Image (tube, rainbow, N blue to C red):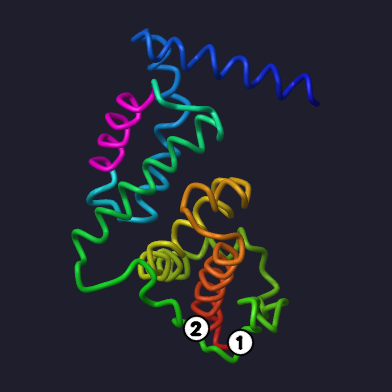
Amino acid sequence: MKFFLNQTQKNEKALIKRLISGEQSAFQQVVSDYQNLMLSVARAIVGEAFADEVVQDAWISAIKALPKFEGRSSLKTWLLHIVSNGAKSRVRRENRSSSLDDGWQAVDNDKFDSTGHRYDDVLPWEEASPEALLANEQLQAIIEETFRTLPALQRAALTMYDMEGIKMDEVCNILDISSSNARVLLHRARATLHDSIEKYQGY
């Protein structure tokens, strides 16, 4: 495992040198590897309308900053951190009257303990599988609408951790938040989605 990690780090350092030297194939490789993920994170924070612009600006910022990249995080985490910062700045600019954390109390407080975890960990579900639930077009529309109305950081945490499979420590680095804050964001986002499903099912 240690050899594998060292080899991965060496490969990444070599890739970064190629990027700094302006090698087009290296840039194409990085775009191919990370463009969709960067768009996913940008959309989660700032929404569809500005995501492309945020990612484009992130690429420009990354190219300029590459010579100073110290490798304290992976290239992926570093790029997503740039996207996150750009997206959060755009949210603040477009919505001067609201905070990134508006809606933090969207779910009743009595459903959570002091750490932000739900008391009722096992939520009631239909007997149908999650796949069957998502196959229901009306329910899928409700879930998508609920997701869009989540506060930006809740959407971002849910997207990265649950949908993209990014590790919790990376999510924290990308969003510049503590582990406890990330877990509260994640639990509240999940709970809000679950509440929408519960209401649809008549619980």
Residue drawn at the location 44% of the way across and 77% of the way down = 104
Q: Residue at x 66, y 84 (%)?
A: 113
Q: Which range of residues does the magenta coloring cover?
A: 52-66
Is 19 above or below relative to 85?
above
Q: Please give the residue where the numbered disc 1 appears in the rendered image.
A: 111
Q: Residue at x 27, y 54 (%)?
A: 89
* Farthest-out residue, bottom: 110
Q: How many marks?
A: 2
Q: Amino acid at mark 2?
A: Val
For the point 58% across and 70% down, which residue is it?
Answer: 187
Q: At which x and y percent is residue 53?
A: 23, 41
With respect to residue 140, does 71 lie above or below?
above
Where residue 145 sits, quadrant-wise, is: bottom left
* Mark 2 and mark 1 residues within 8 Å of each other at the beta carbon: yes
Placement of the C terminus among the 4 image quadrants: bottom right
Characterize the local packing of mark 2: few (<14), some (14-19) or many (20 or more) Cα atoms within 10 angstroms: some
Residue 107 is labelled as: 2
- Is 133 above or below relative to 27? below
Dot 1 amino acid type: Lys
How far apart are the alpha carbons under marks 2 and 1? 8 Å
